[in-house]
Image (cartoon, rainbow, N blue to C red):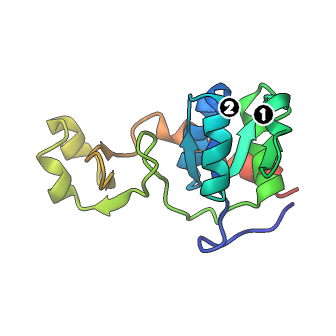
Amino acid sequence: MSNLTTLETAPRFIADAMLGKLARWLRLLGYDTLYLQDDDATIAQRARAESRILLTRDHDLAARRGLRVILIASQELESQLVQVMREAGALPSDTPPRCMTCNVPLQDISPEEARESVPPYVAQTQHEFRRCPCCGRITWPATHWRGIQERLNRVRGEALK
C-alpha cells in the first residue's frame, strides 16, 4: 500500500519481543508502536483491546483469531520498515518522532529550555532540540542523525514505490 496516512488515521502497532529494533525505528518515523516482551496471550489480548496491528515474525502468534497482523517476512531492518509502511500506510515525512523509550510524541523546545539539561558543548553547537513530555529525555540532531535521516528517507522512498 503506497498511500500516505494522516495522523488521525495512522495505524497503531504492537510489536512482540522479536521486533524491538523495528519498534524503535517505527517510533522514529512517528508511528505509535508499543513493544511487549510478554507471553503471546498477553500480547494478543492487548492488541485486540487497543485495536492495534500486531507486528510479529511468530507464525503461531499471527494465526490467533481476532487480530490484525503484519507477519514480518525479513530479518533485515530496512526491509521490515518498508513492509510495514507498504502494508499499513506511510506517514507524512514531517510527522514528529516519538520517544524511543516511552512511545510519546516528542515536543520541540527552544535552545534556552534545553541549555540546563544538555552538555555545554551541545548547548553551544546545536539549535534544534526535542523533549519527551513523559520521561524528560532531550534529543538533538547529533552527528549520527544524518545517517539516520538518510536511512529513513531511503526506506520511505522504497515504501512508496
Q: Quadrant of the N terminus?
A: bottom right
Marks 2 and 1: in contact by CB < 8 Å? yes
Name the residue beneath numbered marker 2.
Answer: 40
Query: Which residue lies most toward the left here?
Result: 116
Q: In terms of sequence position, does the residue under pointer 1 or pointer 2 come before the other?
A: 2
Name the residue beneath numbered marker 1.
Answer: 61
Taking the image as shown, residue 147 lies to the left or right of residue 142, namely right
Q: Position of residue 57 (x, y in %)?
A: 78, 30
* Residue at 84% over, 62% down: 2
Estimate how packed mark 2 is, as few (under 14), some (14 to 19) or many (20 or more) residues with alpha carbons within 10 Å: some
Q: CA distance from mark 1 to mark 2?
A: 6 Å
Among the 4 quarters of the image, the one containing residue 3: bottom right
The number of callouts visible is 2
Q: Position of residue 61 (x, y in %)?
A: 78, 33
Q: Position of residue 130 (x, y in %)?
A: 33, 54
Instruction: Identify residue type, mark 1.
Output: Leu
Residue 151 seen: no
Among the 4 quarters of the image, the one containing residue 94: bottom right
* Residue at 73% over, 52% down: 156
Judge by depth and name the residue closer to the eye, 96 or 143.
96
> Could you tell me which secondary element the residue under label 1 belongs to?
helix
* Residue at 55% over, 45% down: 34
The relative height of residue 86 versus residue 21 in the rendered view (above or below) is: below
Q: Position of residue 69 (x, y in %)?
A: 79, 47
